[in-house]
């Protein structure tokens, strides 16, 4: 793992801000990255890679990894279940004391 510029060291660019808003990763100022355009290779942290080799970027920390990493998607199941319980309880209590007003517009109410 090698590090590039990240919010932790306060280096940022307009391109990085726009990319983040679009949900993309933008690599800004990575001094450990050397690109050889003629040979279609790049070197990062002493590791020589070919143009077609994948690299993964962590847009939050600025970490650069060789190869493809699978993203970890976490769903806070317990928290979501608690919120759903609160919602159900609030909905039940809101309608438990609700009464429809009686009017004399209906034949049964008017005594006819």
Image (cartoon, helix red, strand yellow):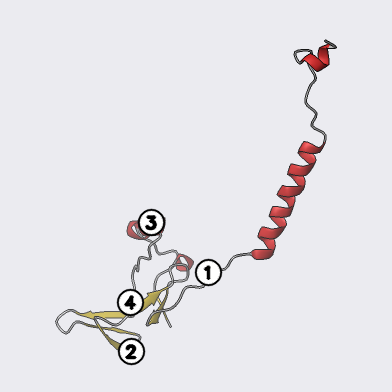
Looking at the image, is mark 1 or mark 3 earlier in the sequence? Answer: 3
Give coordinates of residue 52: x percent, y percent. 25, 81
Q: Which mark is residue 46?
A: 2
User: Which of the 4 quarters of the picture holds residue 18?
Assistant: bottom left
Q: Nearer the viewer, residue 36 or 102?
A: 102
Question: Where is mark 3, residue-wise?
Answer: 22
Looking at the image, is mark 1 or mark 2 earlier in the sequence? Answer: 2
Looking at the image, is mark 2 or mark 4 earlier in the sequence? Answer: 4
Furthest residue toward left: 38
Which callout, 1 or 3, points to the residue nearer the camera?
1
102 over 25 or under it: above or below: above
Question: Where is mark 1, residue-wise?
Answer: 73
Identify the residue shown where x is 81% and y is 17%. 108
Alpha-carbon neighbours of circle 1 within 10 Å: few (<14), some, or many (≥20)? few
CA–CA distance between discs 3 and 4?
A: 25 Å
Left or right placement of residue 76 versus residue 22 in this view: right
């Amino acid at each position: 793992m090698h590090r590039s510029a990240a919010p932790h060291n306060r280096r940022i660019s307009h391109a990085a801000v726009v990319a983040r808003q679009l949900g993309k990763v933008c690599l800004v100022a990575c001094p450990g990255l050397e690109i050889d355009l003629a040979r279609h290779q790049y070197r990062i942290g002493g590791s020589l890679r070919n143009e077609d080799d994948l690299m993964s970027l962590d847009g939050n920390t600025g970490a650069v990894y060789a190869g493809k990493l699978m993203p970890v998607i976490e769903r806070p199941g317990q928290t979501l279940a608690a919120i759903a319980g609160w919602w159900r309880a609030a909905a039940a209590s809101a309608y438990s004391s609700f009464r429809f007003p009686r009017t004399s517009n209906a034949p049964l109410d008017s005594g006819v």
